[in-house]
Each structure stands twice: as C-alpha cells, then as structure tokens.
Amino acid sequence: MHTTCISTEVTTRHDWQLAEVAALFSLPFNELIFTAQSIHRRHFDPNHIQLSTLLNIKTGKCSEDCGYCAQSVRFNTHLTEEDLLEPLDVERAAQHAKEAGATRFCMGAAWRSPKPKDFARVLEIVQRVKATGLEACMTLGMLNDSQAHQLKSAGLDYYNHNLDTSPEYYQTIVSTHRYQDRLNTLKKVHHAGIKICCGGIIGMGETREDRLKFLLTLANLPAHPDSVPLNQYIPIAGTPLANSQPIDIFEIVRCIAVARILMPRSYVRLAAGRTEMNDALQALCFLAGANSVFYGDKLLTTENPTVEQDKQLFNRLGLHTS
Ligand code: SAM
Ligand code: DTB
Ligand code: SF4
C-alpha cells in the first residue's frame, strides 16, 4: 500500500524544498487529491466557491513581449485596441457583475506599468468600484512605491501580478522585463498593505520541473499570496507560443492539488481555460482544492463559460457562492 508522508497539520510553511514538491507531484493521483482535499477542508468550507469577474479596462498596444499574450504590440493578434475606459462605464460593469453574483471585480490593463497621465483615472475607478460594495482587484503591470500606496488609499483590496512560470523558463517567454522585476512589484504591493493575487500559466511548453519550481517560488514568498490564479494556457493565434503542445488534462489538477497543499490558506483559482474543460474536469479541480473561478462571459480578450453555464454547474455540484 502506498502511504503519503505529507502532513495535514495546520501549518503554513515558507521553507518548502524542491524534492518535497517533486514528491507531491509524483504521488499516485488519488493519493494527491485525497491529501489536498483533506487539507482544504481544514481551512475552508469545501462547498464554497468565490466568484471574481474580470474586465479589461485598457486593451492591447502593450510594450511588453510576453509570448503567451494577445495584447502585446509586437504580435499580430487582430485585437480591437481600446484606451483606458471611463470610470462610470467601469462602475456600471461592476454593478452588473455584483447583480450576477460576483464578490470581487478584477480589472486588467495592458501596460508594462501605469503612466502618470492615467493614474488619477485609475484611482477614480477603484473608488467607484469600491462604492458598489464589491472587493476591487487590479492588474496594471509593474508599480512603484508611490503608486502602490495611492492604490491602497483609494481602497484597492487586491493586486494581481503573476510570476507565471519558473524563473528559468520566464526568460525564454519574456525578454522585456525580468522575473526579479515581478518579485520587486510584489514586494511593493505587500508593503503597501494590499492583498496579493499571484499565480501563473500551465501548459505553455514548460516542463514538469518548471511547474515544480514555479509553485515552489510562490510557496516560499515571504507571505503566501492571498489568491493564487492557475491559468490553463489559451493559445492565441499570432503569438510565439501559439503552437505549444497541449498538456495532459490531469496536469492542471495536480498543480491545483500541490498549490493547495503548499499554500493551505490561500484561495486557489481555477482561472483561464475553463471553456476547454468539461464539467467533470472542473469538478475534479474543485475536489483538488480550487475554490475560486473567474465568473462572467469574458476573460480579458478570450471567452469564459457563460454565467448561465456556471450557475448550472455550481447547482449540480452543490457549491454555494456567498
Ligand atoms: N499587464 C499586466 C501584467 O502582465 O501583469 C496585466 C495583464 S496580463 C494579461 C495578466 C495575466 O493573464 C498574465 O500574467 C497571465 O497569467 C494571464 N494570461 C495572459 N494571457 C494568457 C493566455 N493566453 N492564457 C492563459 N493566461 C493568460
Ligand atoms: C489571471 O491570472 N488570469 C486573468 C487575470 N489574472 C488578469 C487573465 C486571463 C487572461 C486569459 C487570456 C485573455 O483573455 O486574453
Ligand atoms: Fe500581456 Fe501583461 Fe505581458 Fe503586456 S505585460 S504583454 S498585457 S502579459
């Protein structure tokens, strides 16, 4: 009989070793899922799922060259570009998301970092979204200390800034900024007192070892991210990674389970890629410890399951959202 040596004690560690993470990934699937679910239910209601709705508040023309992204100015992805939205329009979209049942509104801007000329409007957007009663999250690229503090003062709850993959693989998919730049922004956001949302992408040609190192980096940050979005890579025609080999469907489930074990108190989000998953695979992801999704018909530039499809799925699984 195979027995796991993974403790389900209520501890939060920041000293995980690569060999331990590798051992988790190598567990027989049932063993891994059982361990993750056992840890999950010590910290969370296992039948609750948190819903975040996304809105792209500035689309395309990004100076960066992230090889997976539809919004880089360097790739021809046939995107309809759009400048920073008006605060009132964003507020209306947030109100709509709230009425549909979301508890958090996440706004993305295709920037390397926010420009001074746009920042006053960004702050007004935060204030208007907060006035709806929703939690507010933004992802605007790299921040300096002053920007992080101003966002905090405006009421921002979460900042999303993903590490996306291992330090080694990162430099082969992005050349315009470094992994260390991402870590520096996370530090500034943390010091400003904003909660951190940080995760990455599975399936963009990385090895299993890259996935181990990516999850290890997240788990050994000074504080675990409050929210960990795990995106299944969505191929975007016209980008360098468009022809990546699809990965085994169980790999994302394993990554979720390992993230749940390494970061037991974090919300783990089954993020992009759900339109390619059937209901059974999504249910398996929830069993492995995912307790959040992006909710709403669109992600940033790509499709997401419809609100109606999701309501039916949560209903069939007895998952409650409030
Ligand atoms: N410019 C900001 C930044 O890079 O942090 C915010 C926007 S960026 C599009 C946010 C995240 O979306 C990326 O870090 C990545 O994890 C995810 N993402 C982008 N394109 C994706 C794709 N094709 N498939 C899966 N996830 C993707
Ligand atoms: C995250 O980890 N995933 C979201 C959000 N944070 C900003 C974005 C997913 C984008 C998927 C591809 C697209 O729609 O362009
Ligand atoms: Fe896309 Fe963000 Fe990279 Fe710009 S910085 S190309 S928006 S992932």
Image (cartoon, rainbow, N blue to C red):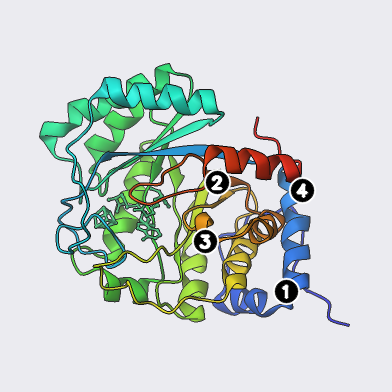
**Mark 2 or 3 closer to N-term?**
3
**Neighbours of disc 3 within 10 Å: few (<14), some (14-19), many (20+):** few
User: In the rendering, which numbered label is found on residue 29?
Assistant: 1
Measured Cα–Cα span from mark 3 to mark 4: 30 Å
Q: Ligand 1 near label 1 (Cβ, under 8 Å)?
A: no
Question: 234 above or below 299?
Answer: below
**Mark 1 or 2 closer to N-term?**
1
Measured Cα–Cα span from mark 1 to mark 2: 23 Å
Q: Ligand 1 near label 3 (Cβ, under 8 Å)?
A: no
Assign a secondary structure to mark 2: strand
Q: Amino acid at mark 3?
A: Glu
**Neighbours of disc 4 within 10 Å: few (<14), some (14-19), many (20+):** some
Measured Cα–Cα span from mark 1 to mark 3: 21 Å
**Neighbours of disc 2 within 10 Å: few (<14), some (14-19), many (20+):** many
Query: Residue beneath label 2, please?
Result: 293
**Mark 2 or 4 closer to N-term?**
4
